[in-house]
Image (cartoon, helix red, strand yellow):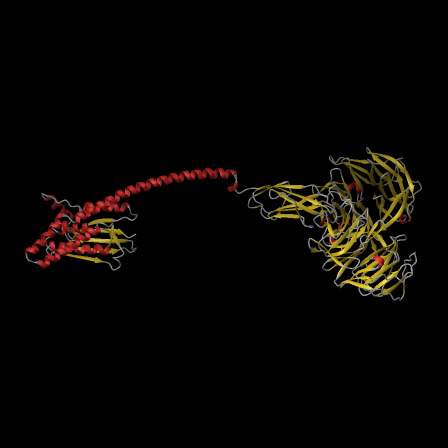
Amino acid sequence: MSFAQQPVTIQLTEKDGLPDIEFYNVLEDKNGFIWLAADKGLFRYDGKSYLNLNHPQKRGLSVFGLYEDSQGRIWCNTISGQFFYIQNGKMILFTDLKDELKGQLPEFKVIDNQLIAFSEKGIFVIDVQTKKRNIIKDVNSKSPYYGYPFQYKNSLYFTFDNQINVLENKTIKHVFNFNSNINLPANNAFCALKNGLFFASFYNGKQHFFIKNDANFFKSYEVPKELEDKVIINVIERDNLLWFCTNRGVVVCTLIDNKINFKSSYLNDEYTTKIIKDKNNNYWITTLRNGVFVMPNIYIQKIDFNGSSNQVSSLCSVENEYLVYGTSDGKIGYWEKLTNNWKIFSLPSSAKVSQILYNAAFKSIFISQDNQAYIWNLSRNEIYSVPFFISSKGISIAANNDLLNASYDRASLIKNPFSNEQFDIKIRLNNPKWITKSNNPPKEDIRFKRAYTTLYSKKTNKKYVGFVDELMKFDTQNNAIPIRYKNKPLLAIDLQETEDGTIWVATFNDGLFAIKNDKVIKTLNSQNGLLSNQINKLKINVNELWIATDKGIQLYDVTIKSFKNLSKNDGLESYTISDMEVVGGSLYLSSNKGIYIIDRIKGFKNFIQPIVYFTSVAIEEKDTVLQNKYELAYDKNAIKFSFNSTGFQNTESIQYQYKMQGLNSNWIPLEKGIDFVRYASLPAGNYTFTVRAVNANGLFSENKTILIEVNAPFWQKWWFYIVLIVGVGAASWMYFKIRFARLEKEKQIAVEKAEMDKELVFSQLENLRSQMNPHFIFNALNSIQEYIVSNEKETASAFLVKFSRLIRIYLEHSRMSEVQLDDELKALHLYLELEKDRFEDTLNYSIHVSSEIDVKAIKIPSLFLQPYIENALKHGLLHKKENRILEINFKIDPKKSVLLCQISDNGIGREAAAILNQNRQFQHKSFATTANQKRVELINKTRKNKTEVTINDLVNEQNKACGTEVVIRIPLI
């Protein structure tokens, strides 16, 4: 049976965002972008997505003929005669030759700032700057077509009629003639070789090859039979191989000793239109009907089992000439290196083949399934079942060809099962003969615990077993010794030994440990080179340590201590690696996707330095025009940087690192697949955002930077501080100036208040003097004397009591600025009672207080009302002989803010009283009026609401004076 073996090929589909299935051309530009000319238009691939570029004047969708000029512009054309170029991300219409070409699709190049288009009308040469046109033709030929231009060593070759010509200085020069009797050549293709120019042409019904060497002539070469009847669309030389795009797949040939030999073919059912190799050694193949295919690494091959099981679970190498494998559905396959033949047969059970181990001494293979075990004697090509290593997790051959076996519940040492076997030296690897045989050697269980892997050290004759809880070493007597690191157990999943006796321990989640003399001498983990701390499998080949992790395959050179990595970006379709074997120059991997073959030397690609660039900058969640510097307002300082690195499947191979100088100076790595950084709120200041990309092999891109200036709010700017300092200084000066002025004013007020208090005291004394004037006292004492002379002792005593009480009240009130209205009323009653006696009971007075007035709550100035009453008596009622009436009324205004005191008498009036006073020879000096006026003025100076005194003259119907009314308004607030 022959299984196909070809490089891992990834088909890009709509799931990957591929916008079309019909492609005519592919090109990689100097920045690593992939350009695709398709039926639906022109697309640019950046490693993640496809950008469609269009022009409003473009007729139709399809584009052809991709070309990058010396300025990095991408050119393309349409079947309608339009030529476009891409510059700064925009499609620009250069020229339109629809009238000249009339629907013909020309091929073109852009060389030395000239667009050179080849057509049936001739060769159009158009200056890119001036757009001046020239048409060049061969006047000696009537051939309708100039085509297939190809630049080689500064010369532009093209085909014309049955010739190969060169265009130099706008002149056609003849180079080579085909036989004159051939049909018109068609489907021609040029290719630059290391030491020559290859040319293929299909005529007379078959393919013809020619190579021009430095002797300047074309020599015919034999065409491999696999290419004779195929139409060659495109050919390139890469990796010392010739790659032919044909109407039936890609054909790969070698060119050795001037002979072209067929090597292999791929995608045989596809009409391939173009093949290129990009900077990272990926092969891109466009097809006419089925999209785009990518070969990430031609040195990683995959075995196509033609529908058979791809679930390969175990491998073993036999004599370095055969590879034997087991599958998860109970099949055994084997491959012969010499003949490249694959064969497969089924075991009686369809259970998973968990382990395969070759015993070279007895030319036999141990096969363990989940429910059965077998020994395959290769020298006799016989196979039979055995009971002693069923469902093995790991088998190794120990001393004396004993078997050290790890199973789900124990580790066992099985004695040599070949004591009665017969063997030939020569092996016969073919589908075996099934026999029945009894073979049940002695077995010793060395520890009852679930085990995963075993190793027998040929250097120390010690046995190692990785258990679920410990890594144990067993001596020749099977005494167990645990091996730990920093007092913690090592949880081993696989064990291998290098030639120097170092035991390498692969763990579930802690990376890799190197052990010698039962001590850990080295650790490898994700911090110092491992792709992941989770390891699936190990394989030693001399000084090569092959490591299968859940993030890729690594080769660790134990001598120079360096890593090489393989990932999905290199063509690995799966990281679920079940086993590894080295056969000759290749590493074989078994996985859930099948068997992969990796060239141990060439399988590691030489990646170029990645190129990183910014894709967008968003401020406050809004995209902006890309620029080198941004200035942000202090309240609009949320910014997001998005970036990318070109290359196929870059999310698998590229990781980004960034730093924001001004915030931090250390590089911060992003997780794979993350290609943006967002800052929610940048403080005011100047920053430099820097990003770089690193690929799987540790190559860093050049740094890309963007400058950021976040403006401080105005209150944080230098001029604001100056204004603030000046303002604070001015405010302080004004404050202290005002404060000093206020203190001066307060001092002045205090002085004035002291003066006022002094004056008030003096005023009160004057009021007291007015109330205790000698005339009043004389009259009072006189009355007392009369009562005594008249022997009216009781009356005299009562009068004296009233007089003394009044004097005491006046003296008490003189010490207070305000008194309760109730106290003032009592004093007034006493005073009027005494005055009534003086008037010999001819005085009728009344004091009326409104019910709304709380006489105990309201206060009025002390010694304030009596002088006005005294005036009414002295100047109004004294000169009236009879019917003397005095009325005193207290009211409160509707707003309850003013106390109204009305003092009215029916005396002779102010005018008559003034006349009488003038006629007196001796005038008594009264303090009452002047003292009260002065006191009112003093009180009003200290109060917002003023006390008012109004004196009204009362007249009768004949307009004659009939008394006086004094209205006093005392504010309560």
- View extreme (right): residue: 181
Viewer-side residue, 674 vs 934: 674
- View extreme (front): residue: 477
Viewer-side residue, 895 vs 644: 644
Answer with left or right where residue 638 lies relative to residue 142: left
- Residue 743 at what x, y percent from top left? 34, 41
- Residue 217 at what x, y percent from top left? 90, 36
- View extreme (top): residue: 169
* Residue occupying image coordinates x 7% and y 54%: 786
Q: Relative to 875, say whether 741 is above or below.
A: above
Answer with left or right where residue 733 lies relative to residue 628: left
- Residue 780 at what x, y percent from top left? 12, 52
Q: Quadrant of the N terminus?
A: bottom right
Viewer-side residue, 802 vs 138: 802
Viewer-side residue, 681 vs 124: 681
Can you tell which quarter of the image residue 144 is in?
Answer: top right
- Residue 960 at what x, y percent from top left? 14, 50
Q: Relative to 730, say whether 819 is above or below.
A: below
Q: Is residue 885 visible?
A: no
Q: Relative to 282, say whether 69 is above or below.
A: above
Report the number of numbered marks: 0
Q: Is residue 972 visible?
A: yes
